[in-house]
Amino acid sequence: MRLRAVRTGGEVVDFTWDFASDSAAALLRCRPVVLNGRTLRAWQDAGPRGQPPLLDRYRRILDQRRTQSFDHVHEVDGRQDVVIHRVVCEGDGVAVTLINLSANRRAQALRLRVEDSPVSQRSDRR
């Protein structure tokens, strides 16, 4: 997803979505069209808790013109999932890639259970 800085007096006070991928929007439990043009603060006020640290973190990354990856806990379908944020400065904003590490681990565990199941082992013998 891509977020553009909203500035007041030269300081970043918020971000607006310029672009949100299907996967980023799914993680945020909406469709991409819902996010485009919306501010991070408005989404935070209407949605899950825990976003002010993201706003502050994205602001620092942009102000310092650096790249950073960090973990952040998001509530996803009633679960506390660890999501990796990979943030890169892009113009007067940031590009963010979100990776739901918890969902990836659940999928990997499920795949291993399926591969180890008796049904899977029988089909391998054919």
Image (cartoon, grey):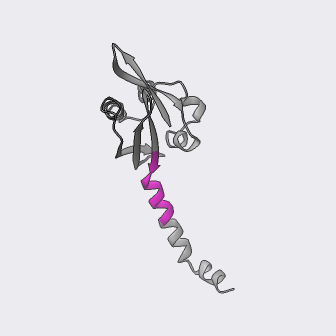
> In the shown orientation, is residue 124 left or right of residue 13?
right
Outermost residue, right side:
126
In the image, is residue 106 part of the stretch drawn in magenta? Answer: yes
Rendered image quadrant of residue 122: bottom right
Q: Which residue is at a point 47% across and 57% down the rendered structure image?
A: 104
Q: Is residue 105 above or below residue 65?
A: below
Please state which of residues 96 and 29 is positioned toward the viewer in this rendering.
Answer: 96
Outermost residue, top side:
9
Q: Which residue is at a point 46% across and 49% down the rendered structure image?
A: 99
- The percent coordinates of residue 73 (x first, y second) are 36, 45
- The percent coordinates of residue 26 (x first, y second) are 55, 42
Please state which of residues 113 and 93 is positioned toward the viewer in this rendering.
Answer: 93
Viewport quadrant of the C terminus? bottom right
> In the shown orientation, is residue 25 left or right of residue 66?
right
How many dots with numbers? 0
> In the shown orientation, is residue 73 left or right of residue 47?
left
Rendered image quadrant of residue 94: top left
Q: Which residues are magenta?
A: 98-108
Please state which of residues 66 and 24 is positioned toward the viewer in this rendering.
Answer: 66
| Majority secondary structure of magenta residues | helix
Q: Which residue is at a point 36% across and 41% down the rendered structure image?
A: 67
In the image, is residue 79 part of the stretch drawn in magenta? Answer: no
Q: Which residue is at a point 47% across and 60% down the rendered structure image?
A: 106
- The percent coordinates of residue 83 (x first, y second) are 41, 48
- The percent coordinates of residue 79 (x first, y second) are 42, 49
